[in-house]
Image (spheres, rainbow, N blue to C red):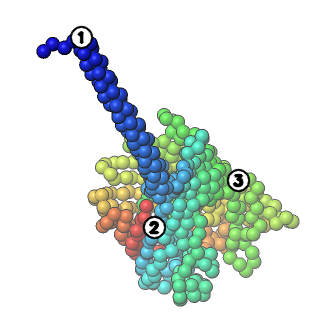
Amino acid sequence: MQLKPIALALIAFGAAGLAQANDNSRIAQLEAQLKAMQAQIEELKKVQKEEITQLQDQVTAQGKEAVVIGDLPNSYRLANSDVSIRLYGIAEANLVHETRGSNADSDYSTFMPYAPLNGSNEANRRGQTYMHARTSRLGVEAAMPTSYGQLTAKIEGDFNNDPRTGNSAVYGTLNNIYTQQATNSYNFRLRHAYVQVGSWLVGQTWSSFMDVDATPEVVDFNGPIGSTFIRQPQVRYTYVTPNYGNFTAAIENSVSYVLEKKAGEDPAATKNGFSRTPDLILRWDKPFTWGTLSLRGVTHEHRIDNGDSIDASRRGYGLAASGTYKPTGDDTLSFIATGGEGIGRYFNYIEGAAYNASNNSIAIERAAGLVLGYQHKFSDTLRMNLAYGTQRNFNNAYTDLALAQGFGGGRFGVNRRVSQLHVGGIWNPIKFVDIGAEWIYGQRETLIGEKGEMSRLNLMARYNFN
């Protein structure tokens, strides 16, 4: 059956309209779906932003609480700061057995120049045993970056000090004895307190005239006689070169330690000591493939001034050479040679100048000393140490004055020669723990020929933290 043209046209127009209506409906649906998806996306963005903020807050909080490694070895960084802090120290106990004359009434118990003389009451006190923990130590070290290089600071002290007498004598006064009756307490004393940045160091530490690296390791806290052992305030500048070593200049605390002999009394340091200028030290150090070498010089003032009739001064000086040598493996040989005229406390022997009232002048001591050390490592945990120190006074106006005024002999008199030997070892059974044993033997002879000896066994247990 055939349709007429008009009917066909109407059918076509109706079909087209229906198709268009379907298309508009589909477009509207798609637009609605798109809007819904956009809303969901915005919601997801909002949620995601909140989650990121929460995570950032958590990371920030954790970062504030977390321990951050500092610039110094075994240090940590302070929160919200560039400052690195390191806490360190040792807990140490010593057992000492004196087999010969006891020197325990001296602050410096192994100070051979004051060892009891043969035949004296002190020399007859043999076999004393005592224990102490006063050489335990505590320190804090800090560092921070600056435009001048890293700035470091250190404060360190120990307890080798008696709260009542100001020294560490085991006996000698009732105060020392009373201290040990109950708490055996000792005051904290300052060892180091300095700031260092670039080539400059300001504060208290080992004297620039002392070579710490060449000083032999021993169990005894004090070490052998015959070299320099001193800490004091100073201002130090070190010029470092890559090929010619390090050049150091320092001004250090000046103390006029001048002996004065008064009628009926032993010679003693006078309160009239009066320094006007700081001590001056020049030094050169250089490392080599075989070891190290150091040369040093010091000049300082001896002065006595009572503001009235006494006003005298004399300049003293000292020279020193030291170094280390690696003969084989991890073994180390060290030496320190020291000498001078009026070297005073820069020699491990505090006398060095005496006042002569007859002509209002100061006589200064001429002395020299040598320290030798050898360390042999059997393993990473066991090492043996040998150390020998000796010193000698030479005749001059100072020895003549000592003999004339009567302090060329006696326990606290001037010595002609002193020597000391240390033989011992240190074992590390576990990390940070040292177990040490050492035998010490020493001899002294005064200007008038009196002699004295000391012999002791020292056992030590030490824990090093950080």
Q: Nearer the viewer, residue 125 or 237?
A: 237
Tell whether 118 sits left or right of 408: left
The image quadrant that residue 396 belongs to is: bottom right
Q: Which residue is mark 2?
A: 90
Mark sitting on residue 124: none
Indicate which disc, 3 or 2, sits on the residue closer to the N terminus.
2
Question: Which amino acid type corresponds to the residue marked 2 in the rendered image?
Answer: Ile
How far is mark 1 from mark 2, CA to CA? 116 Å
Dot 3 falls on a residue whose secondary structure is loop
Callout count: 3
How far is mark 3 from mark 1, CA to CA? 129 Å
Residue at (60, 41) in percent of width and height = 148
Mark sitting on residue 278: 3
Question: Can the viewer see residue 379 in this picture?
Answer: yes
The image quadrant that residue 413 belongs to is: bottom right
Q: Residue furthest left?
A: 1
Q: Disc 3 vs disc 1: which is toward the camera? A: 1
**Dot 1, how many residues are within 10 Å of its Cα: few (below 14), some (14-19), or many (20+)?**
few
Residue at (25, 19) in percent of width and height = 11
How far is mark 3 from mark 2, CA to CA? 33 Å
Vertically, is 324 above or below 115? Answer: above
Mark sitting on residue 5: 1
Image quarter of the N terminus: top left
Question: Which amino acid type corresponds to the residue marked 3 in the rendered image?
Answer: Pro
Measured as percent of width and height from the top left, residue 312 is found at 78, 59
Question: Which amino acid type corresponds to the residue marked 1 in the rendered image?
Answer: Pro
